[in-house]
Image: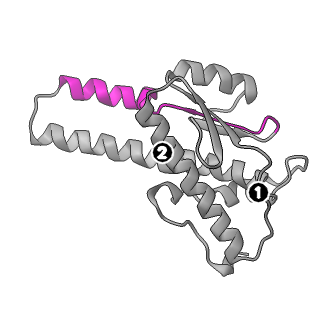
Amino acid sequence: HTTAHFEIQHNSETSEVEALGTCLERTYQSVLGWCRDLDIPTHTPFELLAVALFDKFKDFVALRDRLAPGVDAVGLYVPQSNLAVFCHLDRLPMIEALDHELAKRTPGAQTDDFRAQRETHVARLRQLVVAHEAAHQVLFNIGVLDRSRDYSFWLVEGLACQFETACNGSSGVRAKFWI
């Protein structure tokens, strides 16, 4: 699946891939807008940015553990390989546990509330995890950060955190006083 700026390799259902693509593109635009507002020079990446989306959590973990041993995250961007890796969020163990509880409940208002909380949780995960990791990838590929340099953890993570609301259509933090 390709978008304007990303190539998503996946073994997941179309709706999850499309949701991921939308979030990736919103994050890309948010980062560009932030750079424009702060007069930070950028360039267009030479190729589409590579993303892997796994349907099964265990497949995601297998690749995550090879690319970033010791990292316990539900999404990641690895600058050395320039690859962002995600799992279908409905397949995360914590979400599957919620689904198991939902299946045991009797239909009704209380179950509907619980289901709504689950959907809100998944949406928030997408907002945080996907936008955060996509921001890393975009910042490294448009020239704000250089993959050959070793930056302070607080700088790299702090920048990515600025865009964690990009997936919900928000433009992220774009005030000039942040620099």
Residue 44's mark? 1
Q: Is residue 97 magenta?
A: yes
Q: From this view, report whether residue 90 is shown above or below residue 148.
A: above
> Which quadrant of the figure has residue 33?
bottom right
Name the kind of residue labelled 1 in the image: Thr
Amino acid type, mark 2: Arg
Where is residue 44? Give x, y as percent: 76, 57
Q: Earlier in the sequence, mark 2 or mark 1?
A: 1
The type of colouring in the image is one colour
Q: Which residue is mark 2?
A: 126
Residue 4 pos. (x, y %): 61, 49
Identity of the residue drawn at 25% across and 44% down: 116
Q: Residue furthest bottom?
A: 177
Give the quadrant of the N terminus: top right
At x 67%, y 23%, the residue is: 63
142, 151: nearer the viewer: 142
Q: Secondary structure at mark 1?
A: loop
Q: Mainly helix, strand or loop, the magenta region?
A: helix
Q: Residue furthest right?
A: 148
Answer left or right for 84 relative to 93.
Answer: right
- Please tell me which residue is depicted at 22% across the width and 24% down the height of the picture: 103
**Residue 164 as seen in the image, left or right of residue 94:** right
Q: How many marks?
A: 2
How far apart marks 2 and 1 lie (CA) works out to 25 Å
SS for dot 2: helix
Above or below for 66 versus 41: above
